[in-house]
Amino acid sequence: MASNGVLRGSDIIAALKKAGVSHVAALPDITTSHGLLWPLSRDKELKLIRLCKEDEGISICAGLAHTEKRAVLLMQMTGFLDSVNSIRAIACEYNQPICMMIGLLGKEPDKKPTESKAFGVRIIEPICDVMGIEHMCLNSEDDVERVPDAIAHAYATSRPLAVLFGKVLEP
Amino acid sequence: MMPRTECFKKIAELRGDAVVVPTYSSMFSWRTISPSPLNYISVGAMGQASSHGLGFALGLPNHKVIVLDGDGSLLMNLSSLVTIANAAPKNLVHFVVENGCYEANGSHPIPGQDKVSFAGLARAAGYAQVFEFDGLNRFAAELPHVLTVAGPVFATLKVIADDEPKQDYGYMHSPERRREFKEGLRPILARQR
């Protein structure tokens, strides 16, 4: 695992595998590109589905969940915001285990998301709250260790999950 | 132009145990022609049938998956053509039921009605096989090939709506339909394990 205070994509990948994830649907985001998405794209076990638009990923993950395949959707918070109607219907109203991993472009690493100067970052957790989406923000290796259980819980309860990255990922 | 119900009857005759993802007006018509627990109708948001179909096709790589998309619906998720072509599931058949309008929302014309070529869009996106049908005899003759050739397959069906299916959104969003689907899928998943 990484040292405290650093988020490493290698730890995230290990956590996804521990959670039984087989597919990752993704659009590039500069906060996760170097540390996570590029390594993911070279991983032999996880299947990467490159998307053109984030709401496609909500539906793809739903379809995979029905076939007993675990998937996560990796995107920037702008994609989350753009996908709210699909998340509302498919993840929230249909009670499906859509697991989202969200990069927060513009977030200051020493601040909570709700304290960010960036409006698009500040509103993500309140939106999750009002939509009833469980969320967690990763800032350290200890946080990453909670990811497998959070994904398992999402699938066990058939509810959506939002995992936010509190800082830019390193490989 | 082909009567929609006749097209659907032809597909229903050959679907076997395929998972079918119909959407909006197509779904309301299809559900009476080919009722089955293996119809997945809960696409949630307009445009999302094709992406659900991709998820099913990737999760069930040895099983046929058929999408009955709408033209207005596809326009709302046009990028899915490129995503599907790139993922390249051999088991996915993506029909677009092209009636040129937003039938479920007052039959207003789609942008580009009579101009846009859905087959051209799919071909440019990189689908392995692309078909365009506007006559029932040719459609019936070629359908067995369409449903068995290695995909991803795209076929646009130029239709007229010859029925007025009840627009039952409660049925579409019902958790009971998803429970039925889950039960229907159980033996297929058992075979794939």
Image (spheres, coloured by chain):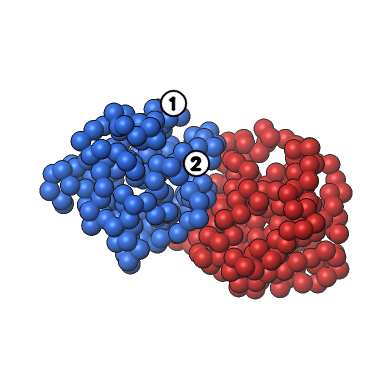
Chain colours: A blue, B red
Question: Position of A44 compared to B159: left or right?
Answer: left
**What residue do we see at 25% from left, 43% from top?**
A167
Q: Position of residue A35 (x, y in %)?
A: 27, 55
The correct choice, above or below, for A164 with respect to A30 in the image is above
Viewer-closest of A54 and B176: A54
Q: Chain of mark 1?
A: A
Q: Which residue is mark 1?
A: A130
**Count of numbered circles in the view:** 2
Residue type (three-letter) at the residue carrying disc 2:
Asp
Q: Which residue is mark 2?
A: A82
Q: CA distance from mark 2 to mark 1?
A: 16 Å
Q: Quadrant of residue A155?
A: top left
Asked if the residue at tag 1 contacts the one at tag 2, i.e. Cβ–Cβ closer than 8 Å, the answer is: no
Image quadrant containing the C terminus of chain B:
bottom left
Q: Residue furthest left?
A: A3
Q: Residue furthest front?
A: A117
User: In front: A110, or B170?
Assistant: A110
> In the image, which disc is placed on residue A4?
none
- The residue closer to the viewer here, B137 or B144, is B137
The quadrant in which residue B127 appears is: bottom right
Task: Say whether mark 1 and mark 2 are on the same chain.
Answer: yes
**Amino acid carrying mark 1 in the image:** Val
Mark 2 / mark 1, whichever is N-terminal: 2
Q: Could you tell me which secondary element the residue under label 1 belongs to?
A: helix
The answer to whether one can see residue A38 in this image is yes
